[in-house]
Image: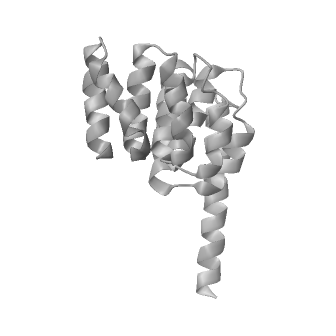
Amino acid sequence: EKQKIITAFDQTRNELVIEVMISIIEDRGIKIKGDELDLLRSFIITIAQKVELKEAVPALISILNKENWVSRNYIIQTLGIIGDKRSIKPVLTYLDDPDSRWTVIDALGQIKDKTVVTRLIETMNKASSDVIIAALRAIGRIGDASVIDKIREYRYDDNTNIRLTALEAINDLE
């Protein structure tokens, strides 16, 4: 009986945390703005990371199509931290969005699913140096050694930061 009460309490707590998290990310009824709101959103992301609220994934995905790219990036970042594979497809839809690209790449690296590596490689082929660096880091975190030869090509890039990040990724993959 005691365990049933604890389980019910945990479920209620999770639902409450999810509702508060979404309200803050969406800026629903929050009277604070600017840096304070960003700080509060960062706090919510930290909570999501600590408690790994996989129950929040469907709710977060449902509000992902925010026109406000700042809110959308907080949602993508939170989904990456939670690390649930259900997030991959919805998050990938924003890979070509210049306002969300780096956040998406970072989130995919945190989710660590090898199915996204091909998309990351494709993105690197037509990207700025910052995107290439972010993708190299994500691929290193994901750990898919099947693309190591492609990553090795970046050891000879003109950009020193790309070369160094490629070496780090190769080290992670070997």
In this rendering, the answer to whether 113 lies above or below 91 is below
What residue lies at 34% left-to-right and 25% top-to-bottom? 153
Q: Quadrant of residue 20?
A: top right
Image spot of residue 83 (x, y percent): 52, 49
> Most extreme residue toward the front, as rendered?
149
Image spot of residue 130 (x, y percent): 41, 17
What residue lies at 64% left-to-right and 27% top-to-bottom? 94
Q: How is the image coloured?
A: one colour
Image spot of residue 111 (x, y percent): 50, 46
What residue lies at 25% left-to-right and 31% top-to-bottom? 167
Residue 109 appearing in the image: yes
Image spot of residue 96 (x, y percent): 62, 21
In this rendering, the answer to whether 143 lies above or below 98 is below
In this rendering, the answer to whether 111 lies above or below 23 is below
What residue lies at 57% left-to-right and 21% top-to-bottom? 33
Task: Judge by depth and name the residue closer to the eye, 113 or 151.
Answer: 151
Classify the position of the N terminus by image quarter: bottom right
Residue 77 appearing in the image: no
Task: Judge by depth and name the residue closer to the eye, 99 or 55.
Answer: 99
Q: Give the mark count.
A: 0
> Most extreme residue toward the bottom, as rendered?
1
Task: Judge by depth and name the residue closer to the eye, 164 or 2.
Answer: 164
